[in-house]
Amino acid sequence: MKTGKKKIEIGRGNRESTAAFNIYLPKSVIADIKERADKMKWRYGHYVAYVYENVSHPDPSKMTAIDELKKINHDQARLGNLLNSGLADAATKANHEEMEKLLRDIRDTQAALKAKVRAL
C-alpha cells in the first residue's frame, strides 16, 4: 500500500509487537476516526497509528516562544494603558505630543508582536 508518507505495514507480518492502548475521547472524535478509517478500508488502530506517524506534533520550544511574546505584549498593553491615562491627566498636558508619539510606538510594537505570535 502506498500512502506517500511514512510506510505503515497493514495486515499480518508486522515486525513490531502491539499492545492495547485505551484512551477516552469525545464521541464525535471517535465517530470521525471510524468514518475516516472506514473510507480507507483500514482498521481503526492502523488509521490512528498512521495519523500519529504523519501529522506534525506541537513543538514545545515554539510554545515557549509564543508564551514569552505574549508576556511582552501584555507588558506593552499595561504601558500603553498607563500612558493613555497620563494623556487624560490635565497636569501632563505639556508633554502631550511626546506622550502621544510614545503611545503610537507602543501600539506599533504590539501589532508587530501579535504578527510574530500568529506566524509561529
Image (cartoon, helix red, strand yellow):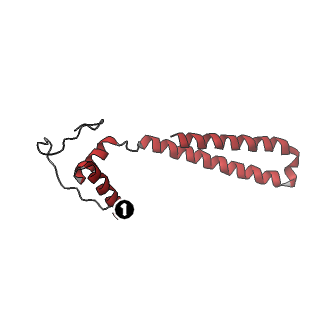
Residue 87 on image: x %, y %: 81, 51
Instruction: Give the crowd class for mark 1: few <14, some 14-19, many >=20 residues within 10 Å.
Output: few
92 relative position to 47: left or right: right
The quadrant the N terminus occupies is top left
Image quadrant where residue 113 sits? top right
Q: Nearer the viewer, residue 117 or 29?
A: 29
Residue that numbered label 1 is attached to: 28
Q: Residue at x 19, y 55 (%)?
A: 20
Residue 57 on image: x %, y %: 37, 44
Residue 66 on image: x %, y %: 51, 44
Residue extending furthest bottom?
Answer: 27
Residue 50 on image: x %, y %: 27, 45
Q: Residue at x 84, y 45 (%)?
A: 96
62 relative position to 113: left or right: left
Q: Residue at x 30, y 46 (%)?
A: 52
Q: Nearer the viewer, residue 56 or 87?
A: 56
Q: How many marks?
A: 1
Residue extending furthest left?
Answer: 13
114 relative position to 24: left or right: right
Q: Nearer the viewer, residue 113 or 8?
A: 8
118 relative position to 63: left or right: right
Image quadrant where residue 32 sits? bottom left
Secondary structure under the numbered disc 1 in the rendered image: helix
Q: Amino acid at mark 1?
A: Ser
